[in-house]
Image: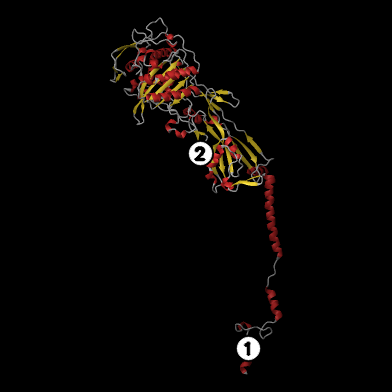
Amino acid sequence: MDERRNARPTSPRSAPQGARRVPGAAGGPRPGKGRAARARGMRIGRPQMRQQVITLGALGILTLFAGRLVMIQVVDPDDLATQALQSRLATTTVTTERADIVDRNGEVLATSVSRYHVFVNQTKIADFKRVENGETVAEGRSTPPRSSRPSWTWTRTSLAASLVGDDTFVYLAKYVTPETWDLINDEKITGIEAEAVSERVYPNGDLAGNIVGFVGGVDDKQGVNWGLAGIEKSQEETLLGTDGSYTYERGGNGTAIPTGEFDETPAEPGQDVVLTIDRDIQYYAQNRLEEALDETGATHGFITVQDPTTGEILAMADSGTVDPNDPGATDGSSRTSRAIEDVFEPGSTAKAITMAAAIEEGVITPTSRFEVPYKYTTSNGQEFKDSHEHGLEKFTAAGILTESSNTGTVMIGEKLTEEQRYEYLTKFGFGTATGVGMPVESAGLLANWDDWDGRTKYAVLYGQGVAVTALQTTQVYQTLANGGERLSPTLIKGYRNEDGTITDAEASEPVRVVSEDTADQVMLMLEDVTEGGTGTLAQVDGYRVAGKTGTAQAVGSDGKLGSIVASFVGVAPADDPAVVVSVSLFDPQTSIYGGVVAAPVFSDVTAFALQTLRVAPSGEAEEPVPDHLGVTRDPYGTSARPRSDRHAGGRRGTHRRSDPRR
């Protein structure tokens, strides 16, 4: 009893875990009071604060929009409108076809034609069906062509494998003619399409291929119509013209907006390049050169034909000329013009320079007398000799040139200072590129006179110790034929405009090398070379011819000076020059002498050129220059018959002639 009276009620906090509280039980809260207490512990929300935050945020956003709107409509409206327009503009480049290259008579040597690259989407062609009269007559890759023309049938059959697969772009054929593409397109086969392209073609094949050049691709440009050689390269800007463009406004799907912005810059087409080349003379020269190689066993050669009064090149033939339609089929060394790139010693053809210089300086005349030995030793101990052994000959200066005597030429050249020798070599064009109009040209090799050694200072007098191109040699005789004035040779006659008019190329200023009187005297001396000297095989019936033979050396394939060059350079008609022709043959097997192997080629090419140009036969010849002392060459042994009769078809005389093997 006492224990029960003294015991305290158990607090709810200390009730055993899991004990259930009964409402109203001793020590427990009353129902009404508990809820009120909880209510007093909860915090009531403040919606006014949230509304203020939202309002401030909205106002901030509206302020940004308003500021941006002010910027767009007030501050930078033009700039922003321009930026928006620029984003919608697209520009397309407009190109023009490469212009033509034609000869002096307008004959096309290079032109551009329209072609097509045909391609297929293999995934589309697989689903193709052809329906005719409501029936499926063909489907898929096995679709037969409706056309019976063999060209399309052959193309479809041969390229059938290219139609199978999952590629979306596969070329079927490139550079297809418009006629063939029309035939293919008529089939209406889904998945076969084409892109228009331009192809460069050369209708005359390898004719003047070394001059015209060819096109191809370059690393930093698109397409394959860029000039890689010849006139195609040197006249690139003229042939291409200037690209144009048109700019248009496009919509979101990329199509042009009809009423949108449009601006066009017209393309300026290129000009046709008119060459100085005569196609017929070039053709003959190339073919005659190939015949000469067969006849003589020479490895290669050059022929140049030039108008001495204008400097225009009428033909420049290289053996093994490249066909620009397929340049890869030609060895790399023959894809350009070796006539202006390969150098060799001019040999005896350069003796005309020594004679002209000596006459111009007044140290000799054509009739100056010399006693010429087979061997001659100069004051510094250098020994020189002629090509053939002989006794002491009494020659005039004209006779020395006619007989092509090395020792006699050295004896004449000794009368000139070393500086004078160098001066005339350079005046005649040695040591400087001619500027003929090609992208690559050699200047030749000519050391300064104060660098010459004890032998070279004499060797240059007869064409050794110096290296030139075939065109530089031609230039010497152009100068003499043109009254002593040198003209820069050129391959560019002018430029043909869209309306067919021709704009002449800028002519070079003539350079006076020797006086007209000196040139005339040397021309007479050179005429004697063909009448009774080493160049008799160069004669052309009906025309007076002046020229010079030459046999010299060139660097061979082994890099050593061991290759032989046999040459002849001449002018016709000698009394009224119309052409200068040079022939150079390398390593001929039948003979090494220019008078034997090159002179006959000169005769044929010159005769053809004169006929093509319709040059009148020569008039009466002038009195010949004595060559041996007291001896004047006359083919009939009498002065009663004028020399001009020799060009009227009469029988040639039987007087002693020099050996053409010099």
Which numbered dot is residue 220?
Answer: 2
In this view, 462 is above or below 14? above
Residue 416 visible somewhere in the drawing: yes
Q: Residue furthest bottom?
A: 1
Which numbered dot is residue 8?
Answer: 1
Q: Position of residue 440 (x, y in %)?
A: 45, 29
Tell me if mark 2 has few (under 14), some (14-19) or many (20+) residues whose alpha carbon lies within 10 angstroms of its own.
few
- What amino acid is labelled 1 in the image? Arg
Give the side of residue 143 with respect to residue 296, left or right: right
Which is nearer the eye, 601 or 249?
A: 601
Q: Mark 1 and mark 2: span between their CA atoms?
A: 106 Å
- Of the image marks 1 and 2, the number of the one nearer the N terminus: 1
Q: Position of residue 617 (x, y in %)?
A: 47, 12
Q: Position of residue 450 (x, y in %)?
A: 36, 23
- Which one is closest to the eye, mark 1 or mark 2? 2
Q: Please tell me whether mark 1 sits on a helix, a strand or a loop.
A: loop
Tell me if mark 1 has few (under 14), some (14-19) or many (20+) residues whose alpha carbon lies within 10 angstroms of its own.
few
